[in-house]
């Protein structure tokens, strides 16, 4: 049964989704507390020195990474990529995104690359690794 084989992967997928929902709560909550905040509109005239901006960007960045990774995970499962490898790579992505989030929240810098950039790249590479494993399995 696919559920049993990919149980760990499904748990890590749930962690990824929960992380993005937490980021949404933090971003929308901090923004809503701002004077003259307009729902659905990105924070204006703010930079990395402002937590409202960093919280919003953290959530947006995770949304940008969510679709490709979740799509890759689903295709990997359907293609029958080894469940241990699928779970492991998904876990690396989840942990990298959490580390990226924490660093983005606590370090206010415009420097590039910043410490959060390294965890962004770890997550991106995890997606690429799983995608390559999926292509290998399918071909």
Image: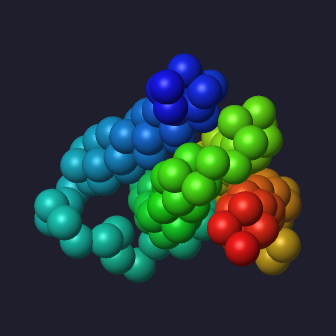
Residue in front for this viewpoint, 8 or 115: 8
Q: Nearer the viewer, residue 123 or 86?
A: 86
The percent coordinates of residue 93 (x first, y second) are 70, 48
Vertical position of residue 90 compared to residue 121: above or below: above
Front-most of residues 123 and 109: 123
Q: Residue at x 73, y 62 (%)?
A: 137
Name the foreground residue: 57 vs 45. 57
Where is residue 71 shown, x and y percent of the image?
Answer: 49, 61
Vertical placement of 93 versus 68: above or below? above
Q: Is residue 137 visible?
A: yes
- What residue is at 23 percent from the left and 71 percent from the top? 41
Q: Quadrant of the C terminus?
A: bottom right
x 44%, y 41%: residue: 17
Where, by quadrant of the figure, is residue 63 drawn?
bottom left
The answer to whether residue 93 shows anywhere in this view is no
> How is colour applied across the structure in the image?
rainbow
Task: Identify the residue at horizontal 52%, vertical 52% (top origin).
Answer: 78
Q: Quadrant of residue 23?
A: top left
Task: Looking at this view, name the residue that lies furthest to the top.
Answer: 4
Number of dots carrying numbers: 0
**Left or right relative to 76: residue 13:** left
Where residue 8 appears, as percent x and y from the top left, is 62, 25
What x and y, as percent, mark residue 20? Answer: 44, 45
> Compared to 83, does 136 lie above or below?
below
């Amino acid at each position: 049964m696919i559920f049993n084989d990919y149980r760990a992967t499904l748990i890590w997928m749930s962690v990824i989704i929960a992380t993005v929902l937490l980021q949404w709560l933090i971003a929308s909550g901090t923004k809503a507390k701002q004077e003259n905040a307009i729902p659905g509109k990105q924070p204006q005239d703010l930079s990395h020195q402002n937590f409202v901006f960093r919280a919003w960007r953290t959530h947006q960045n995770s949304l940008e990474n969510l679709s490709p990774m979740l799509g890759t995970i689903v295709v990997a499962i359907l293609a029958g990529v080894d469940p241990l490898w699928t779970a492991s790579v998904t876990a690396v992505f989840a942990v990298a995104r959490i580390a990226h989030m924490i660093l983005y929240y606590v370090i206010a810098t415009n420097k590039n690359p910043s410490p959060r950039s390294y965890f962004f790249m770890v997550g991106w590479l995890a997606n690429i690794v799983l995608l390559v494993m999926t292509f290998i399995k399918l071909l």
